[in-house]
Image (cartoon, rainbow, N blue to C red):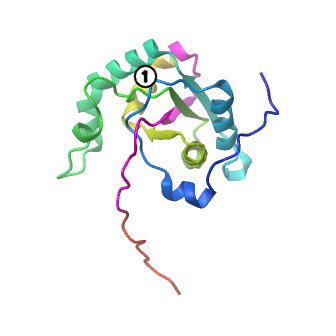
């Protein structure tokens, strides 16, 4: 395995990537090269990390049969998961999950796991996730966090299949691929400033 690979040049600036990044839910069937996926992982681990813990580890799934089985399992548990995170007056799942594929036909599913769940591990892993998504956007790729898959990925049977240790926790499942079209921006609220002295 290469360790000193050349990182692909981004086609847009960091600030442009921040404003251009979208949650993409429609992908072409084109696969991604080892080099591009590895470059996303390399960008991911450049994230800030409390006391230099670097508590992240990654699983990359490209195998369609595994993704299909994960999708089927996630769909079976969807209502239970939705009830556990339900926000009154807001229907979450029906708006975002197509009936045929929980992972939207993306080329790869990258799962960020946290080791030894200390107080800052979740934050560190989400910072790594944001780096990965911005790097993907800067290189013309789409991403989307599939948060409803977390409970399935942390089940003992899936940890066993992936060879994941008991002390590791799936935190950020992110699909990555080549978008099949344009994803409209979602209007963002103005920053809510509670205090500025």
The residue under the point 57% across, 21% down is 164
Q: State which quadrant residue 71 falls in.
A: top left
Residue 190 in the image: x percent, y percent?
Answer: 39, 71
Q: Which residue is mark 1?
A: 155
Indicate whether 125 appears above or below 51: above
Q: Is residue 25 visible?
A: yes
Nearer to the camera, 184 or 162? 184
The residue under the point 25% across, 43% down is 92
Nearer to the camera, 35 or 102? 35
* Furthest residue in direction bottom, as rendered: 197
Indicate whether 189 appears above or below 137: below
The residue under the point 82% across, 33% down is 4
Residue 141 in the image: x percent, y percent?
Answer: 53, 39
Give the extent of the magenta segment: 160-187
Residue 106 in the image: x percent, y percent?
Answer: 45, 28
Q: Is residue 34 magenta?
A: no
Q: Is residue 178 magenta?
A: yes
Residue 197 in the image: x percent, y percent?
Answer: 53, 87
Q: On the rendered image, what quadrant is the N terminus found in?
A: top right
């Amino acid at each position: 395995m290469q360790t000193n690979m050349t990182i692909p040049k981004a086609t847009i600036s960091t600030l442009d990537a921040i404003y251009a990044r979208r949650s993409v839910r429609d992908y072409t069937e084109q696969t991604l090269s080892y080099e591009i996926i590895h470059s996303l992982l390399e960008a991911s681990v450049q994230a800030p990390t409390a006391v230099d813990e670097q508590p992240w580890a990654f699983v990359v799934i490209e195998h369609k049969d595994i993704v299909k089985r994960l999708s089927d399992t996630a769909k079976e548990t969807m209502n239970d998961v939705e009830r556990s995170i339900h926000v009154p007056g807001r229907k979450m799942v029906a708006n975002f999950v197509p009936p045929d594929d929980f992972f939207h036909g993306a080329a790869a599913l990258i799962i960020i796991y946290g080791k030894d769940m200390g107080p800052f591990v979740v934050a560190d892993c989400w910072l790594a996730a944001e780096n990965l998504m911005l790097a993907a956007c800067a290189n013309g790729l789409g991403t989307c966090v599939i948060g409803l898959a977390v409970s399935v990925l942390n089940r003992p049977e899936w940890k066993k299949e992936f060879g994941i240790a008991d002390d590791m926790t799936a935190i950020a499942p992110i699909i990555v691929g080549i978008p099949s079209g344009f994803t409209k921006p979602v209007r963002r609220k103005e920053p809510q400033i509670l205090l500025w002295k």
